[in-house]
Amino acid sequence: MLDPLSEVLALLKPRSYITAGFDAGGDWALELDDLAGRIKCYAVVKGSCWLTMDSDAPVPVPEGACFVLPTGRTAIIGSAPDVEPVRASAVLAPDRSGEVITYNGGGDVYLVGSRFEAGSPHVELLLRNLPPLMMVKTSDDRARLRWSIELMMEEFREPRPGSALMAQQLAHMMLVQALRLYLAAPARDDVGWFAALGDPRMHAVLAAMHADPARSWTVQGLATLAGMSRSTFAKRFRARVGETPIAYLARWRMMLAAQRLQHGDDTIARIAGSLGYESEHAFSTAFKRIMGMPPRRYAGLARQNR
């Protein structure tokens, strides 16, 4: 049985599109203008840099830090916050996977990591509530994360047969481990399904809904599962996830339905029944409300794009 994080990542289908090293020197800054619908995960293995998300205050990224940019918001990375950036797409070759890119002479800061393309057409729905920047340390007891980073560096230093594929697999491990470590950090005020996974009681509730999405869940039943009163649970769930338990369940059901409509041959009636809807009409109404179009039209468009 998959846990909620594994299920969401499986639905996202993150594909490592570019896995590379980046060696920069002197004064430099790049505007990462290629993030829409993508996830970036990088580790600073030498030196330090700064990250600025839109109009937010610049954030220092020290040596030994790993950061994830999951929401598609524009970001600027550079040697200092006051350096005028250039667009990354204008100076970096699009087909650079498996390489170490030397920029502005190199020598001062070295990063390794990957840019992931999300295979789901509904990536925005799945990622919209994630923090725009998630940063963790690779030091202390973060052995698994350090291991994947060190092996990735080795693949870049000494390319061998299969190095590109090896680096991509290591990039996936690096991404999952970084997300794990971020969840395990002290509580924050982040809101969304991902933030809720760091709350043991909310995690248990989300895991139960993901394990049996067709069940006729009630707020009272979920509250009992969390060991809380109905009112306290409802308030806490909304504060942590950003929506009611029943709204979350409905949206998750529609994500699963969209996946099956896109890639399978099940009838709408069969999908509706498997997700707990007593009639195709009730399912179609919910699908249109959440996904923006009737399931029959969605399935037709999906078939055209196969």
Image (spheres, rainbow, N blue to C red):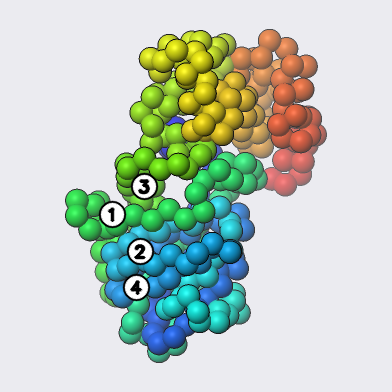
Residue 215 visible in the picture: no
Residue 236 visible in the picture: yes
For marks 3 and 2, give the one nearer the viewer. 3
Mark 2 sits on what residue?
43
Mark 3 nearby-residue class (10 Å; few <14, some 14–19, many ≥20): some
Query: Alpha carbon of mark 4 to alpha carbon of mark 1: how far?
Result: 18 Å
For marks 3 and 1, give the one nearer the viewer. 3
Query: Alpha carbon of mark 4 to alpha carbon of mark 2: how far?
Result: 10 Å
- In the rendered view, does 299 fall on the left or right side of 69? right
Question: Which is more N-terminal, label 1 or label 2?
Answer: 2
| Residue 171 place in picture, x, y as percent | 38, 57
Mark 4 sits on what residue?
48
Question: Which is more N-terminal, label 1 or label 4?
Answer: 4
Question: Which is more N-terminal, label 1 or label 3?
Answer: 1
Mark 3 sits on what residue?
182
The amino acid beneath tag 1 is Leu
Mark 1 sits on what residue?
145
| SS type, badge 2 | strand
